[in-house]
Amino acid sequence: MRGAVGFVVTAFLATAAVGCSAGEKVITAPAASSASASALAVRASSSSDTPSAEPSPSDSAVVGDTVNLTGLEDGQALAVTVVKVVDPARAENPYATPKAGKRFVAVQFRLKNTGTAVYSDSPGNGARLVDTAGQRFDETYGDTAAGPGFPGSVTAAPGDTALGFISFEVPSTSTIARVQFTMSSGFADNTGQWNVPAR
């Protein structure tokens, strides 16, 4: 009997785990309102004489685009914009330089509360960089000279906006390919993703 109960519990947990992971998704499409800004960013960053095609809202989000995300709780929603990527970023404190063989990268995010609930979280917990090799990098502590960072915790009422940099420490040889952001300190079921142009 005990073996049968153990089997049922194990089967239930396995089913629950599958159910949790099945709902997770990566959102790469920019909000329709940011499509024109994306087109300008692509043209500005292009070094070729060939005109770039006008991106449509279905194209993958790039730096400058806005992606709509939701949190774990009802009423939690953000319109998240990756405003700029500073790579490399100089340390604000000359005594807090990157470790040997590494560099700082700073990403400026704009977070607009589009939900009905108050946003209260630490944005850095849900931010991540991905390089061309597939390596993931979480926030590092300490500000850079790129600009003001977010405080430890950000609170924004519905309709309010927060702007700040999040810093990362990455290997000097890494080429950053994507920026990711997830609400609810990284535990929400949807993750926004932006492509980063080669520097």
Image (spheres, rainbow, N blue to C red):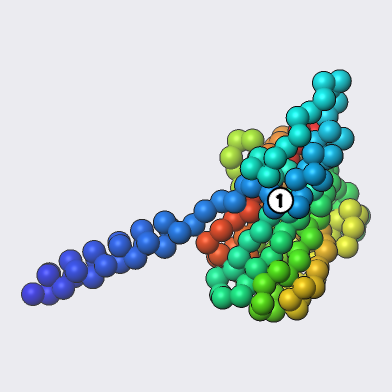
Q: As displayed, is residue 183 above or below residue 84?
A: below
Q: Is residue 50 above or below residue 19?
A: above
Residue pictured at 64% horizontal, 47% vertical: 29
Q: Provide residue 163's location: percent of width, then percent of height.
A: 83, 64
Secondary element type, mark 1: helix
Residue 35, percent from left and from top: 75, 45
Side of 114 where 45 appears, left or right: right
The residue tagged 1 is 32
Residue at 76% over, 34% down:
54
Quadrant (top left, top right, bottom left, bottom right) of the N terminus: bottom left
Whether residue 155 can be seen here: no
Q: Is residue 102 above or below residue 94?
A: above
| Residue 31 visible in this rendered orientation of the protein | yes
Q: Is residue 72 left or right of residue 99?
A: left
Q: Among all residues in the image, which is located at the extreme left?
A: 1
What residue do we see at 66% from left, 78% from top? 117
- Given the current orientation, which residue lies at the most extreme top position? 49
Question: Residue at (79%, 48%) from the top-left corner?
Answer: 64
Label 1 environment density (alpha carbons within 10 Å; few <14, some 14–19, many ≥20): few
Looking at the image, residue 128 sits to the left or right of residue 157; the answer is left
Res 133 quadrant in image: top right
Instruction: Name the amino acid type tagged 1.
Output: Ala
In the rendered view, would you say 10 is above or below 95?
Answer: below
Task: Report the front residue among 155 and 51.
Answer: 51
Q: Nearer the viewer, residue 77 or 138?
A: 77
Q: Quadrant of residue 184?
A: bottom right
The image position of residue 118, as x and y in percent, is: 69, 79
The image quadrant where one finds the C terminus is top right
